[in-house]
Image (cartoon, rainbow, N blue to C red):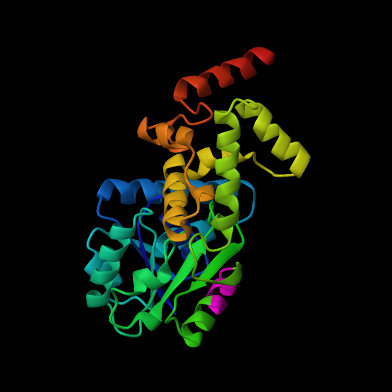
């Protein structure tokens, strides 16, 4: 596989495109919005600059990585020569099904179709494709260029050959692929999201505050980031969607989103990307921090 198409230029999509391009693959990055594509490419460039400043890559590697990426707003044009398509759109079942119906018509029968979904059934996604054996889950972790794990999810019809190819490809990206079966939330989010939800319930019930809950988990359980801060980083809307998928799939109340999480999502307080979640990420808050640092000197 040499030609990779990535659908979605958001946080996960641009990270996936960056990772493939840095490993020497030709990448077609696709989004319906030119603005989203520009923002995605700006993010990739900034992340490469960060790696350059830490001497993890050279200027030449930065240029070749960016040169390996071509952007498209036309999905048909972007996927026409792809050996692998990785869908990284919003975690919405109907949207993903719509995309895969289109991919079924616009790609060759031997093109592997992968979804970066973090919770939605690969078998369900594959059901709208005429040859579902070529559909697989390829769940990268955020931030993609840094995190080693890739969950490889086999749908009911996914073949051994397709699975083997994607496992090998992941290793060529310097990732660690782990094969898992197709159940709601797979492994990562089946374990992670109930913990995050329980942390939110702990806050909702007044047991402790945001700082206290996160500090207990960081210092007591050696987590690099507290669950509430991690939820902000993932996006509270994404956490809510994943929990709903698991609740619908298992019909178990332990997966039901906390009322506090639901209200925060409704209010648009969804974490880092909105400027506010359990923590304040607004520009004014950043200015306060800079001012405080200046005064301390």
Residue displayed at 72% across by 35% down = 216
**Residue situated in front as seen by the camera: 274 or 124:** 124
**Residue situated in front as seen by the camera: 96 or 258:** 258
Q: Is residue 98 above or below residue 232?
A: below
Do we see residue 56 in this rendering?
Answer: yes
Residue at the extreme top of the image, as rendered: 295
**Residue situated in front as seen by the camera: 233 or 211:** 211
Position of 240 compared to 188: left or right? left
Where residue 257 appears, x then y in whole percent? 47, 43
- Which quarter of the rendering shows the C terminus? top right
- Which quarter of the rendering shows the N terminus? bottom left
Position of 176 compared to 153: left or right? right
Where residue 213 appears, x then y in whole percent? 66, 32
Instruction: Write down the region rendered in magenta.
Output: 167-173
Where residue 214 appears, x then y in whole percent? 66, 34
Residue displayed at 57% across by 48% down = 194
Q: Is residue 257 above or below residue 102?
A: above
Identify the image quadrant of residue 288.
top right
User: Principal SS element in the magenta part?
Assistant: helix
Q: Can residue 289 be found in the magenta stretch? A: no
Do we see residue 4 in this rendering?
Answer: no
Q: Can residue 172 be found in the magenta stretch? A: yes
Residue at the extreme right of the image, as rendered: 220
């Amino acid at each position: 596989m040499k030609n990779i198409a990535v659908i979605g230029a958001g946080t996960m999509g641009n990270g996936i495109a960056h990772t493939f391009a840095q490993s020497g693959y030709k990448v077609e990055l696709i989004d319906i919005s030119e603005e989203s594509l520009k923002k995605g490419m700006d993010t990739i460039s900034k992340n490469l600059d960060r790696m350059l400043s830490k001497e993890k890559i050279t200027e030449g590697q930065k240029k070749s990585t960016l040169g390996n990426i071509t952007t498209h707003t036309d999905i048909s044009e972007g996927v026409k020569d792809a050996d692998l398509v990785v869908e990284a759109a919003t975690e919405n079942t109907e949207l993903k099904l719509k995309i895969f119906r289109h991919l079924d018509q616009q790609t060759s029968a031997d093109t592997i179709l992968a979804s970066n979904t973090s919770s939605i059934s690969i078998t369900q996604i594959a059901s709208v494709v005429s040859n579902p054996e070529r559909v697989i889950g390829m769940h990268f972790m955020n931030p993609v260029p840094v995190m080693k794990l890739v969950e490889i999810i086999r749908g009911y019809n996914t073949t051994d050959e397709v699975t083997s190819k994607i496992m090998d490809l992941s290793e060529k990206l310097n990732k660690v692929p782990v094969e898992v079966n197709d159940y709601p939330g797979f492994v990562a989010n089946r374990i992670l999201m109930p913990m995050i939800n329980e942390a939110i319930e702990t806050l909702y019930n007044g047991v402790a505050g945001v700082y206290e809950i996160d500090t207990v988990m960081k210092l007591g359980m050696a987590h690099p980031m507290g669950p509430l801060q991690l939820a902000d980083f993932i996006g509270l809307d994404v956490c809510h969607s994943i929990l709903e998928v698991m609740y619908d799939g298992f019909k178990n109340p332990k997966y039901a989103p906390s009322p506090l999480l639901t209200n925060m999502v409704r209010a648009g307080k969804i974490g880092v990307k909105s400027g506010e979640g359990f923590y304040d990420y607004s520009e004014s808050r950043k200015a306060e921090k800079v001012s405080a640092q200046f005064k301390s000197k």
